[in-house]
Image: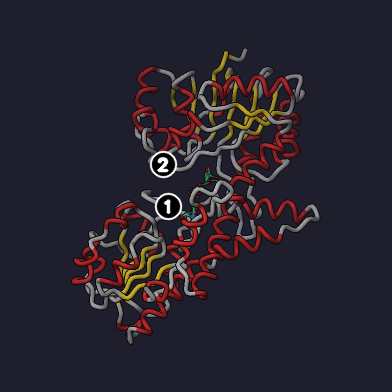
Amino acid sequence: MVKKEKVFVMGLGFIGLPLAVSLAEKTEVIGFDIRREVVDLVNKGNPHIFEPGLEETLKKVLKKGNFRATQLVSEMKGCKYIIITVGTPCDSQGVPILGQVESAAKSIGENLQKGQFIILKSTVPPLTTEEFVAPKLENLSRLKLGKDFGVAFVPERTVEGQAMKELKTLPKIIGGIDEKTNKEVSKLFKLLGGKIIPVSSPRIAEMVKLMDNTFRDVNIALANEFARAASVLGADVVEAIQAANADYPRNKIHTPGAGVGGSCLTKDPLILAHVSEKAGEPLPLIRVARKTNLEMPQRTFNLVQNMIKRNKRDFRNSKIAILGLSFKKDTSDLRETPSKVVYDLLNQTGAQISLYDRFAFAEEVHKLFKAQKSNTLEEAVKGADCLIIATDHSEFRELKLAKIKELMRTPCIVDGRHMISPHFALELGFDYEGIGRPKEAFERK
Ligand code: SAJ
């Protein structure tokens, strides 16, 4: 017997844990993870990931008795809904590795009961729900898809740092295999809030997810190409974008920068390109956009190189400070961070490099960069010959440039995120370069 609305969430990571805890505010939820330490921490009210509001809500639902974590997959029995939120990493060509989805599907297939609805949320290539997960479940359970159980794909669209809020407000795309599944799965996601958008099949919902992130990646690449044009034309790309976007309803030009990090924008466009190519339809625009964005850390490094040269310095006797190590504003997340690429390029020059990021955890920085982060901004910039702003952490908008200039040996700034005013920096006597903001654009005035 499946219990009304009871939910089993498989995989308590960045997507699974916030979702499980948010649903537990409204219904009974069991969270499953294979990692014992995660299960133990979560059951004690200590999330192993940081997301604003998560810890408070976790403590609340644990106290209410609406949520607990388990390592026992058999506890899915009796749950009406089983949500798969396991990881789907990709190889460098964008070929998704579906091992975790496969093992989740196997566990579910072996325990499946009549009346259950299986909802896939991990990002997957289109058709995975219909042609990979559903047949596995049918074969292992000997139950009939559509008649005995339902399967749906419901993409996760929240952004890190806003997940607890966005889970309640973002529209939910419901891609069930039939009308009945759409109706039942919609009931579950209605509990969270936000508009319900049922679509005609799982493959539509799978495409929505990949199109969301591809749209963003391609648009960022376009902004990065505008920056390249601005640089050679002696124009300031930031001024041009602001003017183009101002009160003109058909423009929403994105922001150029030192690179695109994170595991989503770097991966999802490649998945779409890969499956389409495999089916005989190449998608060159998506591939080129990815390449454009991948080149941005190198272009940031090139600006540093020019600056070191024109200030008659030598990398081997220089100190360069990288400000901002995570891939994303005001977070500690180092996944696919462009700062690491800039760091590796600098490392080859023999320069001394200091690293500063108030959010990134010291152990994680050490693991990825094989170097220590500085304890303070002052320590990082002291005696430096160039500083690079690589992440748009809010604090970099408030940099005390006059004081920083006194601490530096050679006052040079490469602003990879448009955080400081070039006019102000130049006025103070800094040498300045920004992505799409050539120095001459400011000197002419
Ligand atoms: N970036 C730019 N220029 C921009 C916007 C972003 O250079 O105009 C860079 C950022 O600096 C960062 C990277 O792109 O390095 C990605 O940041 P992000 O904030 O765009 O995205 P993610 O990876 O944190 O989250 C994305 C979101 N997708 C969309 O907005 C379409 C989120 O809603 C998804 O849920 C998430 O991917 C995911 O999990 O797929």
Where is the N terminus found, in terms of image quarters?
top right
In the rendered structure, are the residues bearing label 1 and label 2 in contact, judged by CB atoms less than 8 Å apart? yes
Question: Which element is circle 1 on?
Answer: loop
First-in-chain label (1 vs 2): 2
Residue appearing at x 55%, y 29% in the figure? 73
Q: Give left or right: position of 382 versus 281.
A: left
The response on whether ligand 1 sits within 8 Å of label 1 is yes
**Residue 123, image x and y in percent?**
61, 43
Query: Which residue is identified by label 2?
Result: 161
178 above or below 366? above
Q: Give left or right: position of 41 versus 260.
A: left
Q: Which amino acid does label 2 sit on?
A: Gly
Label 1 CA crowd tier, 10 Å (few <14, some 14–19, many 20+): many
Q: Which amino acid does label 1 sit on?
A: Lys
Q: Give left or right: position of 324 versus 264.
A: left
Question: Which element is circle 2 on?
Answer: loop
Residue appearing at x 46%, y 39% in the figure? 35
- Viewer-proximal residue, 173 or 64? 173
Q: Which of the colour schemes (rainbow, by chain, secondary structure, one colour) is used? A: secondary structure
**Residue 184, image x and y in percent?**
64, 19
**Residue 171, image x and y in percent?**
56, 31
Residue appearing at x 35%, y 53% in the figure? 393
Query: Which residue is identified by label 1?
Result: 328
The response on whether ligand 1 sits within 8 Å of label 2 is yes
